[in-house]
Amino acid sequence: PRADRTALSMVFGKTRASSKQFVPAVSTTELSPGKAVSGICAGLDICIAVDTDGSVYALGNKSPVLGTPMAAGRVADGFIKDPLTGTSFDVRTGQIAGPWCPNFPFSILFSIIEPTGLPVFKCKTGGGAVSVEVDVNAKTNFESGYWK
């Protein structure tokens, strides 16, 4: 029947326009200076980093080297440090700060990998939560190309 065809066409290959919205990520009670926590916003894994001065930032939670969570990192003086590779990233821009993968053996293993920064997101606190601006249709659009 026609309803079945309509349902299928909505699943296979259909995308939606980008729609950026602030989505609650984590409760402010989870925050403490110098630490980071992770949250899921519209299907995206987000790292909420709190600098030692109390400033709050939102970055991609996946280390560009190993894919490990950046929320395990230490935050200080405007930087978050990947605890495994030792790579530091600027929490404002996501750009690499200092040497790429300085911790042994990563310094040797990943010296040929192109240094890559982290994505950054706008965030705000209020109502007892940290909200992050994300494209709420990104996950749907990504998955629309998966089942073909």
Image (tube, rainbow, N blue to C red):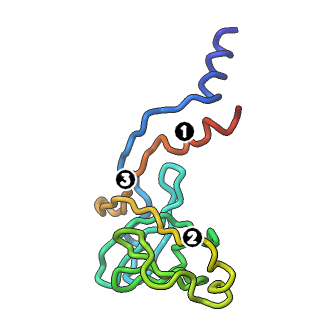
Q: Secondary structure at mark 2?
A: loop
Q: Quadrant of residue 30?
A: bottom left
Q: Nearer the viewer, residue 3 or 67?
A: 67
Query: Above or below — where is 32 with respect to 120?
Result: below
- Of 135 and 85, nearer the camera is 85
Above or below, comparing residue 49 to residue 14 in the picture:
below
- In this view, the residue farthest toward the front is 112
Q: Are marks 2 and 1 in contact (CB under 8 Å)?
A: no
Bin the neighbour count of mark 3 within 10 Å (Cα to Cα): few under 14, some 14-19, many 20 and up. Answer: many
Q: Is residue 124 left or right of residue 108?
A: left
Q: Is residue 60 above or below residue 87?
A: above
Distance between the alpha carbons at the discs numbered 3 and 2: 28 Å
| Residue type at the position of mark 1 | Asn
Q: Which residue is mark 2?
A: 114
Of pointers 3 and 1, the one earlier in the residue sequence = 3
Instruction: Give the Cα separation between the discs numbered 3 and 1.
Output: 17 Å
Residue 41: image tag: none
Badge 1 crowding class, 10 Å Cα cut-off, few under 14, some 14 to 19, many 20 or more, is some
Q: Sort mark 2 into few (<14), some (14-19) or many (20+) by Cα contacts within 10 Å.
A: few
**Secondary structure beneath disc 3?**
strand
Q: Which residue, given by chain and number where applicable, does mark 3 sit on?
A: 133
The location of residue 69, given as percent across then percent down, is 57, 71
The residue mark sitting in front, 3 or 1, is 1
